[in-house]
Image: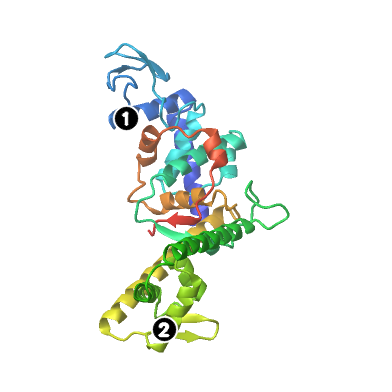
Amino acid sequence: MLERFENDGEIQKIWQTVLSSAPTDSDALDIFCQHWRQNDLLRCGYCGSTDLDLAPGNRKCRCDNCGKKVWVTSEKLLERAERFQAYLAAALIREAGLFISGAAFARLTEVQTSTAYNILRKFNIALVNQLPPGAKEISGRLMKMIIAKRTRETPAQLHPFAEQELIDEEIFQNSAEQDSGASDCTQNKSVEEEQDDFARNTELVLGVLSTEVGMTADDVHLKTGIAIGIVTGGLFMLELNGKARSVPGGKYFLCVVSATDQFQAREDSQLAESVRLGAIKYLSVIGEYLHRVGRKGLQHHLAAVWCALDRATWGPGSLISLSGMHPPVPYRQMLEYVSPPFLKIVIC
């Protein structure tokens, strides 16, 4: 990404381009429609035909195939939109790999602050829904420095980070309930079966240990979902067998016993370090441009940073195309959205 002063300068250039190419909202709508038509995204909602008799500046037209009247923004991200000029600016800014806050966007486009935030939120939700299966999951604790704004989810008289603490507590409780249910189901198991289960769980514990990044029993419990008592016992057995070592503070490290194990441990360590550095990059961008955010909508901001960083995926025309493919995002959906317990980022 560009430095802050370069980023802001490029945004001003884009806005001047929007003003010259689309001085009115009708002109901006025409740009969207032209792009959608070129990319086969402008179709009749009844018969699917592309033969639409659309006059410039209009969103309502007639389908030449079935004869019905069609709204070109129907069932699209821009359904019921009015400020198409601002939507166009938001799309072009994101496509250029630039980042802007809601308040700055309101000043730039001279729309109401609430409208500016809603425009950016719609694009953010659409981006969240495009996150690939390979996106990495991280704990909100890595974002502690920027979680400092109260939201509808923040408990009364507590710091905004309490939202994350409640999420962690719920994860612990769910794990405990799962462990309890598993315990009830295994009461009739034989001693040999229980020993086999313990051995399998111990192998899982061994699989998450690293030679460079220490993990406590609680860390292993969260990562594997194995009961804390079994995790503790497994770590003890691994240490006795020379496969793990502990240091003051209760952290455990993997003891490499073969070249294969050493290679795997190095791979795991590099992956963990890559995710950590990626999270720091996301955190720094949000911290620089938004300063502080709430936990509730944090995933939205992470998706916006992904759009700014991933130039291969979100290049020119990508956001305008997305606006023609993504279904509408109602205001209630924006209002009630809550970021998932484990946040997702794409390492770029």
The residue wearing badge 2 is 237
User: How many numbered badges does the structure rendering display?
Assistant: 2
156 to the left or right of 199: right
Pick the quarter of the image with the C terminus.
Answer: bottom left
> Residue 239, percent across and down?
42, 86
Pick the quarter of the image with the N terminus.
Answer: bottom left
Q: Amino acid at mark 1?
A: Leu
Q: Residue at the location (41% across, 28% down)?
A: 75
Contact (Cβ within 8 Å) of mark 2 with mark 1: no
Whether 94 is drawn above or below 268: the answer is above
Q: Residue at the location (55% across, 46% down)?
A: 101
Q: Residue at the location (34% across, 31% down)?
A: 35
197 to the left or right of 252: left
> Residue 127, percent across and down?
42, 45
166 to the left or right of 68: right
**SS class of the residue under badge 1?**
loop
Front position in the image: 191 or 55: 191
The residue wearing badge 1 is 41
**SS class of the residue under badge 2?**
helix
**Residue 270 seen:** yes
Quarter-of-image position of residue 135: bottom left
